[in-house]
Amino acid sequence: MLKGRSLLEPMDFTMDEFEEVFTLAEEIIAEPERFRRVCDGKILATLFYEPSTRTRFSFEAAMLRLGGQVIGFSEPGASSVAKGESIADTIRTVACYSDIAVIRHPKEGAPRVAASSTDMPVINAGDGGHQHPTQTLTDLLTIRCERGSFSNLAVGVCGDLKFGRTVHSLIKALSRYEGVRFVLISPEELRIPDYVRKGDLVKNGVEFKEVERMQEVLCELDVLYMTRIQRERFFNEADYIRLKDSYILDAEKMKLAKETMMVMHPLPRVTEIAVDVDDDPRAYYFKQAKYGMYVRMALIMSLLGLQGEEQR
Ligand code: NCD
């Protein structure tokens, strides 16, 4: 039962609960008109303390397409945050006006603090370099719809594995599926943090290897998950500049990959995928953004305990 719960990390949901959300998302994709009014009278609050395009818009579009309404801020400077209000006080106040809240915050753990200060469901839309569970729901729904199953996949994850929260959540969630194998492609300085390497991969006996060169592993991958070097998390700009073009996937390199390999990216991209890959049928990143809206529709409904309308 997901009703009334929060989603702060992927592991807050069991595999069966993930399944429940995906099944509902697929029903919404098949018959969106059945769900047009299920959130009538409900309000979603979006509290974005960090920039966002896809995550905020997809949540807002999700709520609007379910017939609900949206309040929120994307410029915390224009709210009482600028006066020094704590996140606990902000969420308590927001809970007086809304039924469910989505929070993106630069501090790791901030959405958890918010969730522990209210009974309203709180969704983590990205906390610093930590976790981004709804991006993972998006990524998994994309693989499920486009490929059918997660089992026995060879998943390459490339770029900023240190600060990339989408990567941390993706590895946590995918590690639970049978036979999934990871190829972690990053510069030495941007390797996956120990809490993921030891806490998820090693602990669960998941097969993985860490490499620096993308070209040498492309041929073995079923999914290549590209990520942006997370400029805003670097302590100094010189390091960012040195590392920013570590990986550029282009049409030439795509020749080394399987005919069926899926190229994914949470977006925004900077230079890590050349635009000449966009028309390759193996490029899934814009489709992925669309799946993000459907899976968030399913998530909102599940946390609010709402069902689709009966067909007339
Ligand atoms: C990601 C994020 O915010 O972590 N974006 C997203 O939500 N789709 C990835 C990124 O910013 O690089």
Image (cartoon, rainbow, N blue to C red):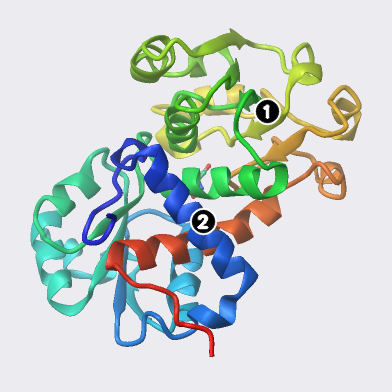
Q: How crowded is mark 2: few (under 14 residues within 10 Å), some or many (20 or more)?
A: some
Would you call the spot at circle 1 few (<14 residues within 10 Å), some (14-19), or many (20 or more)? Answer: some
Give the mark, 1 or 2, whose residue is nearer the N terminus. Answer: 2
Position in image of residue 14 (x %, y %): 35, 39
Is 221 positioned to the left or the right of 175 in the image?
Answer: right
Front-most of 299 and 123? 299
**Mark 1 falls on what kind of element?**
loop
* Three-letter residue code for mark 2: Thr
Between 214 and 25, the residue placed more toward the observer is 25
Q: How many discs appear?
A: 2
The residue at the point 18 percent across, 62 percent down is 81
| Badge 2 element | helix
- The disc placed on residue 245 is 1
Q: Which residue is drawn at 56% across and 66% down?
A: 27
Q: Quadrant of residue 108?
A: top left
Q: Nearer the viewer, mark 1 or mark 2?
A: 2
Residue 203 at x, y percent in the picture:
36, 11
Return the mark for residue 139: none
Tell me the amino acid under the disc marked 1: Asp
The C terminus is located in which quarter?
Answer: bottom right
Residue 23, disc:
2
The N terminus - image quarter: bottom left
In the rendered image of this protein, does residue 8 appear above or below residue 75? Answer: above
Residues under labels 1 and 2: Cα distance?
38 Å
The residue furthest bottom is 312
Work out whether 159 lies above or below 45: above
Task: Tell me the quarter of the picture where residue 43 sits.
Answer: bottom left
User: Which image quarter: residue 225?
Assistant: top right
Q: Residue at x 47, y 82 (%)?
A: 310
- Could you say where residue 28 lies in the image, as x and y percent from the top left? 55, 69
